[in-house]
Image (cartoon, rainbow, N blue to C red):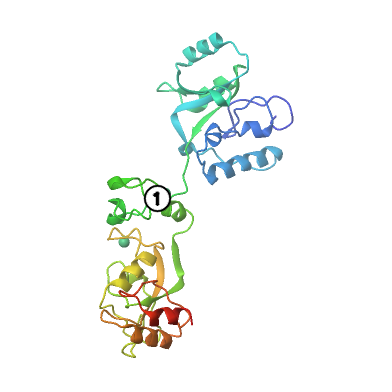
Amino acid sequence: MVGNGAECAPGFENGNLICHRSGSETERCRHPFLSLGVRASWVLLLACLAGLTSRANEATPKPPLDLSRFRADRILIKPKQGVSLEKLRQLHSRNQCAVIGHFRALGNVQVLRLPQGPPARGLISNYAASALVDYAEPDYLVRTASAFPNDPRFLDGTLWGLNNAGQNGGKANADIDAPEAWGLVRSASNIIVAVLDTGVRYSHEDLSANMWGNSADGSHGTNALTGTTDPNDDSGHGTLVAGVIGASGNNGTGVVGAAWQAQIMACKFVDSLVNWVSVLTNLSTLDGSSVFTNGELPYQPSRFYRAWLTR
Ligand SMILES: [Ca+2]
Ligand SMILES: [Ca+2]
């Protein structure tokens, strides 16, 4: 009945939505919001593709319709080209539907508000059977690929570099699109990130869960200044850097890092009263002589520092 070139059966069949009466299979799955630039969810696309596949193979069991995936109070219809608008209005009246919007660039697709009572699926069947529309379909819910953690300093807009809505007079979207990235991946728990800095306050409420642990002694890194495995931070800079990288995300506390989970290894090679001789000497002991991670510039111009960088 469907997918054989003949007119398809309208409405729902075996629990599946079959609401398009003409056109190719592609037309059956066209969704106006996609053309409007709104990112429909992969779930929706996959569901659509799955529908095509099932139509091509009638032997494939059809999944039940998920009623949670579209709005129950409105549907979309696309009037046939040249259709009598008066007949369409009469149909709306019989179905107690009201036109609440148009997408004229998409063939004058109409957004219909449904009356309370009849479920959307019945009205979709009515419209599809009317011969007045190319298709009638639900207003599918769209799931954006974004994730928003509940950490207070993210929610109040302090961390504008992660997501900037223009709060506090800032420039909207001048950020790194962190929520969009988190919609794809948010954990780096399998990655050890060495922070070569002033150490890390590994007991910090937003870092303790994300510190790397030495299986031999339980330490969280190394301290080139003291020759020990206690890299606690006496400055704060390394702790800040560690937080930017991997402060615990979505734990309802403090801030959130680029990664919600990570393994941060604190490698302390400077302290709060450091000079460049000791910096470079101790950095070399960390076997990081070719790496300088935090990009800090000296307080005063230093020919010695410049020479080290360009050696
Ligand atoms: Ca953004
Ligand atoms: Ca947090």
Which residue carries the number 1 mark? Answer: 174
* SS for dot 1: loop
- At x 58% / y 10%, what residue is drawn? 84
105 relative position to 302: left or right: right
Residue 271: image quadrant is bottom left
| Mark 1 Cβ and ligand 1 under 8 Å apart | yes
Above or below, 100 against 177 in this view is above
Residue 203: image quadrant is bottom left
- At x 60% / y 30%, what residue is drawn? 18
Q: How many marks?
A: 1
Of residues 51 and 150, which is closer to you in this image? Answer: 150
Of residues 257 and 176, which is closer to you in this image? Answer: 176
Above or below, 92 against 149 in this view is above
Q: Position of residue 139 (x, y in %)?
A: 49, 31
Of residues 73 and 162, which is closer to you in this image? Answer: 162
Q: Quadrant of ligand 2?
A: bottom left
Q: Position of residue 263 (x, y in %)?
A: 41, 72
Residue, far top: 86
Q: Position of residue 45 (x, y in %)?
A: 57, 42
Q: Position of residue 262 (x, y in %)?
A: 41, 69
Label 1 Cα crowd, 10 Å radius (few <14 / some 14-19 / many 20+): some
293 relative position to 131: left or right: left
171 relative position to 101: left or right: left
- At x 70% / y 41%, what residue is drawn? 59
Of residues 177 and 2, which is closer to you in this image? Answer: 177
Residue, far bottom: 227
Above or below, 275 against 264 in this view is below
Work out which quarter of the rendered image holds the N terminus and state it: top right
The amino acid on which the numbered mark 1 sits, given as a three-letter code, is Ala
